[in-house]
Amino acid sequence: MTALPGWLRRAIPATPQELAAALWSFGYFFALLAGYYVLRPLRDQMGIAGGTRALPWLFSATFVTLLAAQPIFGALVARLPRARFIPIVYQFFVLNLALFWLLMAMGIEPVIVARVFFVWVSVFNLFAVAVFWSFMADLFTSEQGKRLFGFIGAGGTAGGLLGPVITIALSVPLGPHNLLIAAIVFLELAVFCAARLERSAGAPQGQRRDERRVGGSAFAALSGLVRSPYLLGVAAWVSLLSFGATILYLVQANVVAANVQGGGAQTRIFASIDLLVGLLTLATQVFATGHFLRRFGTGMAAGALPAVYVVGFLVLAWIPGLAVVIVLQVMQRWMNFAIANPARQVFFTVVGREEKYKAKNMIDVVVYRGSDALYGWVFDSLQAVGLKLGAIALCAAPVALAWVLLSAALGRMQERRAALPGSREKGEAP
């Protein structure tokens, strides 16, 4: 890594000892999110193809699937070292994609496959990204996370830019199902980068750090979560993240379905949103995220996202149109990826190693998708009693305001934990 040009080394907020791990982490996240963002517009179009009234049921099916998968993942983490269970998770998803490609190519039960694929992508997204960030929280300290997580997140953003470009260019001429092949290639590249990251994070003697198993039981995630007020607070933050995203997603689905006709046109709108979000996020992560976190702390960084929702829901209550929905979707995702998400990942650098993989996965996966299911039915119920989209947005604004206050409280707790002498329990920083 010493062969890097001097200007590039200065652009990366890593010490010489951290540089290799930071770059492989960047590449790992790049490949992972490039694969996901090839699939995301296809998932959104298939959600509409199955009927917008079916979306709350799909959210519920996603939650049930994740609930069943959580103890299996917990057992895998408890029994295998990190360098083994991480590739297993991603290779399992590769096999799933190959099966979906075969079903779509043969035209077997397209509506059923579309709904199952919607659920699968929702499961894949959370599991794949949660595993990545658990790895990061296991490698880096709180101080390193504030400096490096913005840069590492920029790798995912760059991948998120490439994914929509591929989808926009190829979804119509090649057919959406052939995009799954590109996603498979990116996932295999992510596995390669994860393996090289393990090597770069090894001890000076060349011994792998991950030879220690995380240990514990398959069900330790739940007990670890309920015993910790701090983790319960983070879980509440993630649930409110789902609240904002779910309400806005369902508003978006209804508005797009009513105003834009044709699967290709709808897919291109979703891919264009992804592309714009990626450009804004990448610029912010490269030039501002690390400085923002170090200057203002995790509480204000985490609170920036719900502040966007407070304003956005109020505007949406007044003008519930397609343009406002698109602008709010771009703004909230930009603020989430560029500022709030790095802060949320820093929250986990000050907890124990078992909590980083098990309780964190429970929060990021089960709590998040369980909240999706809950808020999907809340949205459906509000529509059933006659509330229009603008009125639903108005009801959501006070909830987002409470989320701002929770962010500030969690930031104070994280800073206190980071200041404790024993807070760097892992001792794994490269």
Image (spheres, helix red, strand yellow):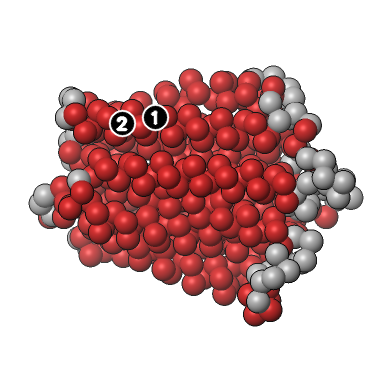
Q: Do the residues under discs 1 and 2 have CB atoms within 8 angstroms?
A: yes
- Residue 291 point in image, percent of width and height: 64, 72
The percent coordinates of residue 152 (x first, y second) are: 60, 59
User: Does residue 230 lie above or below 255 as drawn?
Assistant: above
Q: Residue furthest bottom?
A: 7
**Residue 225 at x, y percent in the picture:** 65, 31
Looking at the picture, tell me which residue is in the foreground, 18 or 98. Answer: 98
Density class for disc 2 (Cα within 10 Å; few <14, some 14-19, many ≥20) is some
Q: Which residue is mark 2?
A: 100
Amino acid on which disc 2 is placed: Phe
- Residue 96's disc is 1
**Amino acid at dot 1:** Asn
Give me the residue at 33% from left, 41% from top: 180
SS of the residue under disc 1: helix
Residue 112 percent across, percent down from the top left: 22, 26
Q: Is 76 situated left or right of 383 in this image?
A: right
Q: Secondary structure at mark 2?
A: helix
Residue at 58%, 26% in the rendered image: 73
Please determine whether, in this image, residue 210 is positioned above or below residue 342. above
Q: Quadrant of the N terminus?
A: bottom right
- Kindly report the distance in space between the C-alpha atoms of the residues bearing marks 1 and 2: 6 Å
Q: Is residue 346 left or right of residue 173?
A: right
Left or right of 204: which side holds 248? left
